Amino acid sequence: MQFDLPTEIPVMTLPNLVFFPQALLPLHIFEPRYRAMLHDVLERNRVFAVAQLDRTPSAATGAAEPPHLVATAGIIRACQKNDDGTADLLLQGLCRVEIVRILNEEPYRLIAIRPLVSVAGGTKAELRKLRNQTAQLFNLKRRLGLPLAEEMTRLVQGVVDPDEFADLSAFALCEDNGFKQRLLETLATKERLQLIARQLRREIALTKLQRRLQGGLPDDRIARN
């Protein structure tokens, strides 16, 4: 999708949420600052960013709610305003952005951004192979009974493009937000797919080991093993 991204956009800084390009994110807007933000972006270009709150000690922005400096800009695809002044909207990710600086905090946070472009990092054949291997690992994880939403797994695995597959898999099927932030900050599709596959292999191997140690006992009787 061709879109001229503004150089200054509002941002929601949210805990425990990493947003990705192409992903669809439902949001319930209720805080006064975000109601004001929503009013303004609907009047302008329908674009704002979502950044994960940075809880690490090294967060050095000086902001009260320091954001991770790599976030995702999105465009509002649908918005339903409610009688109580709240709103429900659907945000679609456009692209990764780097937060260059925070311009102001009132009435909501406004940031200067630099778009970050995803790169292949490998040949088309390499990316197709990695995409297929990663899809197989997700299937194996689900067959082992590890938590994966079946419908979402099926939807993501229908995505053919390796870059889009990597981002949607990270958003919908990966659980650790620290790992997801690392994936968001990784611009090479090949490296992103390799990281996801490595994490899946680690989870699968750990699960198999735990089940061998557990033997045939149910979870509530492991202590008897």
Image (cartoon, helix red, strand yellow):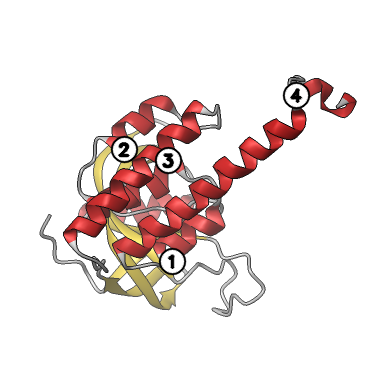
Q: Which residue is mark 1?
A: 109
In the figure, is residue 16 to the left or right of 85? right
Looking at the image, is 167 positioned above or below residue 157?
below
First in sequence, mark 1 or 3: give its number: 1
Between the C-alphas of marks 4 and 3, the distance is 24 Å
Residues marked 1 and 4 touching at CB (< 8 Å) = no
Q: Residues within 10 Å of mark 2 (few under 14, many from 20)?
A: some
Q: Which residue, given by chain and number where applicable, does mark 2 sit on?
A: 156
At numbered mark 1, what does the secondary structure look like: helix, strand or loop?
A: loop
Q: Cα distance, mark 2 to mark 3?
A: 13 Å
Q: Nearer the viewer, mark 1 or mark 4?
A: 4
Q: Secondary structure at mark 2?
A: helix
Q: Is residue 135 left or right of residue 197?
A: left
Q: Nearer the viewer, residue 18 or 187?
A: 187
Q: Which residue is mark 3?
A: 137
| Quadrant where the C terminus is found in the figure | top right
Mark 4 lies on residue: 219
Choose the circle earlier in sequence order: 1 or 4.
Answer: 1
Residue in the picture at 33% in, 51% down: 166
* Above or below: residue 29 compared with residue 9: above
Q: Alpha carbon of mark 2 to alpha carbon of mark 1: how far? A: 32 Å
Q: Does residue 204 appear left or right of residue 131 in this picture?
A: right
